[in-house]
Image: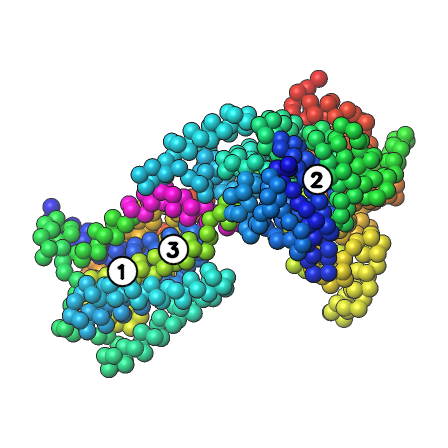
Amino acid sequence: MYAAELVGVTKRFGPVLANDGIDLAVARGEVHAVVGENGAGKSTLMSILYGLHRPDAGEVRRDGNRIVLRSPTDAIRHGLGMVHQRFRLFPGLTVAENIVIGAEPVRRGRLDRAAANEAVAALSERYGLRADPSALVGGLPVGVRQRVEILRALYRHAEVLILDEPTAVLTPGETDRLFEVLRTVAATGVSILLVTHKLSEVLAVGDRVTVLRQGRVTGRFTASETDADELVNAMIGRSLTPPAPRRARVPEGEPLLEVRDLTVRDADGVARLSGISFAVRPGEIVGLAGVAGSGQRELVDSVTGLRGAVPGVFLAGTPVLAGRDPRVAYVPEDRHGRATAPGMSVAENVLMGAQRDLASRGGLPRAKVRARARDLVDRFSISAASVDVPIGALSGGNAQKAVLARELTRSSQVVVAEEPTQGVDVGVRERVHDLLRTARDEGAAILLQSSELSELRDLADRILVLYEGRVVAEFPGDATETELGRAMVGATG
Amino acid sequence: MNVFEWSFLAGVLTATTPVLLAALGGLLCQVAGVFNIALEGQLLWGAFVAVVVSDLTGSAWTGVAGAVAATVLFSALLSGPAVALRADPIVVAVGLNLLALGLTAFLMRQIFGSGGTYSSPDLAGLPDLGELGVDVPVLREQSPLVPVALLLVVVMATWLTRTRSGLRLRAVGQHLDAAQAVGLRVSGYQHGVTLVAGALCGLAGAQLSLGNVTLFSEGMSAGRGWIAVVAVMLSGVYPGRLLLACLLFGVAEAFGFRLQGAGLPQQAADAAPYVITLAALVLAAVTRRRRRSYEHA
């Protein structure tokens, strides 16, 4: 008997068949990975299991019995718990309050804070999930917040725990700790459903793997008996082409981007970047590594001109211009904030910034705009129903391709890319990397900020490591992850 | 202690109470994430109904009860569209504020036969605490609703921090989806606070027309509901801070009366409390934001 089962689950959203007769079974105490590209139907499937969507056909079973889930409340009652990718926490409440809410201990009509703190401390102890019960959640690092989410599910007696892309927001160290926790939790008999598209994680922590593609199950594996190639095959229906060999030649020419002794202070005078110097030459990709909050945001904002005309930043020998220097192509991390206007159409988004080229007699001819947009959509193989749909309706991978389409066709010599493959699947990741390599081969100077070390190692010619606002180390592109990881946490040597 | 001091302090309390009662309702709504800027209209409506009912029955307390009931009904006009139908609460609230203004003026002519100001010997005002045997100098000439309002500040602070429903209410206001995800009936809480805010505005209105004075005049809420809105926005979710903000208005209004006595033109004296309150509240908010940004760095 399985702890949880989805049998023949089908779900349709308008014309899209998100889940097509999916069977998925999770045994007690098992870590079961669910992998697939963006849009493969993972999220829909998990939403059905958590009562957020109701299936058109098929059923959900718990311990062999059919259950009907009308809402997350029903799911909780049936021992299901979910840690969403976007945390569902209350920033102004304490850790303990966040965990017990919905099932609070009450004594004589009052909230029993002592009992709540005790219960939370006991759970923390039992599963090795350290968190101070009386700390306000709003001030906690992301890794700890995630623990609070997991503790909440365990407090509500979850026997099946769904985690949606739990490592997307974590540093490598936090990821390792999470995996230890998941093993501990699973050892107590809780079943874990781990939704991810990072194959290394699947192989590291999963017991069994179910692969989805286009709403169907395309593979079921035992983690110890499979490998990344086999999983990729099932995920995208073909093998990945091996990465282009690293070029041996040293990039030459005058730097297109040069940073000299750059220091940036925040509003209170605290230095966020100190004494940064480096140069990026034509045809070169320089990687930027560092634990989140080490000064990446400030550096990117300085280089793109978003921080104003900061002294010390030069583009092709002249100072950077305030407000988004047109000589820089910028692929922001925040896809629906900085990178796109989610409510505007694909056409408007891919051509934003190019309006002057398209304008005629004070207006924007619609036909011309749409023709140009369609051309970009084809060239960058963006799948969208039409160029008139809002870009916010596209999957993460397609939205990202649209951002690249806009930025890489700007004829800017310098490209700044922030987490360019965050939250996209392996297929899109490969495509994004190809696009960046092509830009490099055409002579662009690229600054690539990424928290994924394998990405930096695949693409960068050199990798700079930021730590507390300083460049503490520089490595060749083939540095090991251990070397990089040590430098990222300030361990020198 | 000289009489001047006590009477000034008493004036402060009198001026504070209607604003405070309305603001407590606004605070509850803010805690639960309902944007309620219809306090002004509800305050006026409450003041009107209190006078009508008191005039008809000859009982001030029946007037208070009537005002509370009628304002709860009135606030359902906000909670229905804004909570159940997810309409824009600002648009709905603006509509309600205008409705209260027009409806009270219209009904006044229908019921009392003329506009402007209505007062009559049949109209029973709330008794003074002195008549009820309270012999504290500042409270002697206050209506019983004054200590009630002060007590409500404590009750609300305790409720929000110490009880289960208070915790849930705060949760609903902080993250609607998360509250839903942990199984809270979000719209129930939001309807609830909107209606309770209606009841508090009813009390505020009754205090204004039967406590502070014993009459009704068109538009007599005179922006007090808006002062309450501003006080709520600037004091966040803390009843203690809210009390301070409202007291500030009370001090300014009492001070305005003094100035008028001292020969300041009436218009200037009338405007003084609003100007002083707004300036001080904005200043307080700016300083707080500065400090907060420093703490975050």
The residue singled out by tag 2 in the image is: A34
The residue singled out by tag 1 in the image is: B203
**A50 is higher (above) or lower (below) than A291:** below
> Looking at the image, which residue is at 73% across and 50% down?
A21
Give the total number of marks visible in the rendering.
3
The residue singled out by tag 3 in the image is: B193
Tell whether position B173 is magenta.
yes
Label 3 sits on what residue type?
Val
Q: Which residues are magenta?
A: B154-178
Quarter holding residue A256? top right
> Looking at the image, which residue is at 77% across and 69% down?
A365
Between B221 and A44, which is closer to the camera in this rendering?
A: A44
Label 2 sits on what residue type?
Val
Say which element carries label 3. helix
Relative placement, left or right, of B67 versus A150 is left
Mark 3 and mark 2: Cα distance apart in space: 42 Å
